[in-house]
Amino acid sequence: MLLGVIGPSGSGKTTLLRLLASGTGSHPGSSKCLAFFRPPPLGVAPGQEASGTVRLGRGGGSGGGSLSRSVAFVPQEDLLMPSLTVAETLHASALLRLPSGTTAREVADAVWGVVTELGLAHVALSIIGQPGVRGGGGISGGERRRTSIGVELVTRPSAVVMDEPTSGLDSYSALGVLSACRRVALGGSAPPRPVVLSLHQPGAELMGQLDAMMLLASGHVVYCGPPSAALSTLTPRGLPPPPPGRSLPEHLLSAVSDPATLAALLLAGGGGTSDSSFLLLLNSGSGKVESFDGREAAVDVSQVQLHTTTAAAGTTSAAAARPGGCADSATQHARWPWHHALAVLMWRSGLDMWRRPQLLLLHLLLGICGGVFVGGVFYKPDDTLDGMQARAGAIYFTLCLFGFTSLSVVDVLVSERVQVAREVARGHYPTSAYLTAKLALDGLLLRALPAALYTAAMYPMTGMSSDGARVACFLLALGSFAACVGVLAVMVTCVVVTAGAATLLMNLILLVWVLVGGYLVNPTAIPAALRWLRYATPLFFAFEGMLGNELRGSFFTLKVAGYPAISSIPGETYMGAFGLQSSRPALDFSMLVVFYAGFAVLAVVAALVGGRRAG
């Protein structure tokens, strides 16, 4: 059964379809949806609630939890990772969503069955690309839309709901997508199943693909039945005859857009109530609409039974749910372990970083060029006071450089926010797995690797100690500090959502760190009430640990014009002038680990608290 839902803009098509897909008006998924990754509202008007039941199959389950696992929802937007191929995109969806214990052969069969069913075999190994971006390339719009459908079909759902799958496509591509939808309904790699989709401006050729049509207007069902019977059914109710040359879909949309005609049609059809109540039965076996009535009726459930009411706020129902909420995670079926989702997400993100290496290459280039530049500025300082100042300045500037460049993670998170929100809401994976994968790759490839290249270039040029243990400590502290800033940026981005606000707030935080980090101002010059600030910043511990790592056991000569030189002054004395200690490297490096873990925990806690308040 292929049912098309048509109606003017604002008639309630998208709201209806999302209610069908979730069963309650809520987004199915984990109850722990974070504020940053919360999916957008379903479209139910403020001050209203969606209530009722949606049942799938004779005696089947109802409600958001069980229904959302059986009904696939394909949104209007194509939310696909542009750097993956079609086959890789489908494979990732299958690995994340098929039940625990599914074998590799079963995953491959599911993926290639969908590829064949949707006619994507010729582009299966092609990069999806990014339309509208120079050099984006990739597959066509129709192929992208069919790939979006395939992402849902790999789970072999019992029913499929699609929001305007032909929107934005030319007539040929739109017909190809609708033909693929019809193959899905008739059964290709899976048994026949009902497919419900909305159409914005369907032509006569597209309407010919439908088994049934539902006409919505202002939240009311005006007609539901075979497209061929629409004219004969609605004309006695007050539908004016179509002008010569106007297609049936165009005439119907024009007629229900007129308030007087719509009122007459609803009154004659018994649907002129204050609620939007309807009962729909789809039977995929017989391929016809079994029953429709504007009032409630008791009928046998065939394949899909929908009874939904959009009522005023305060309506009580066991299935009622506020839009934008998150389904209870207890309703989720047995899934793969958490580390399985982590491995799949790291594979997917790694492929994306490999095929779109601009950010990675910029960080690596920064590491090499920045190391050479800083090494040139602070080249081979001597063992005088000026040399001590140069070493301290090189270390402090290095930490500032890697701190501010770690903000690149903000744009990465914001660019993937919509896709991640949808995937988390649909229960593809927990948010914690996504954040862990991002932080792991970010820390290894964008923080640790550039830090190693930077150290290799800068360290020998500045004449720092060549002892292997000291070089390792320098690199460990630098990479750990950069990772701390990265995870803090993730926390801030999850809380404030927008990239501009997150970047501004992070810049302010880093500037405060720079001010109290131990180099620009002596702690004894800071008012006593504010001296604690240096202990609240990882920059202080990184600077103290790295400077102590370099100066411990060294000596310098103090030369002041007009005075005799003073030699053999311990490097620890120079550090003491900054209020720093060289005798606690273990504490300094351990505090960087504590800060990293603390920022990671705070990121989750802050996002959860924000999510509950907003929900």
Image (cartoon, rainbow, N blue to C red):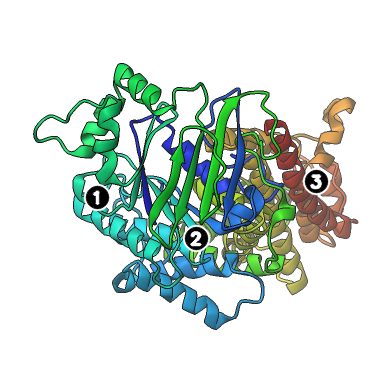
Q: Mark 1 belongs to which amino acid?
A: Leu
Structural distance between the alpha carbons of marks 1 and 2 = 45 Å
Q: Which residue is mark 2?
A: 360
SS at circle 3: loop
Q: Mark 2 belongs to which amino acid?
A: Leu
Q: Closer to the observer: label 3 or label 2?
A: 2
Query: In this rendering, would 296 be left or right of 88?
Result: right
Q: Mark 3 belongs to which amino acid?
A: Pro
Q: Which residue is pictured at 34% across the width and 65% down the height?
A: 183
Q: Which residue is mark 3?
A: 564
Most extreme residue toward the bottom, as rendered?
105
| Mark found first going from the N terminus, 3 or 2 | 2
Q: Closer to the observer: label 1 or label 2?
A: 1
How busy is the neighbourhood of tag 1: few (under 14 within 10 Å), some, or many (20 plus)? many
Q: Which residue is pictured at 59% across the width and 50% down the height?
A: 55
Q: Where, by quadrant of the figure, is residue 186 drawn?
A: bottom left
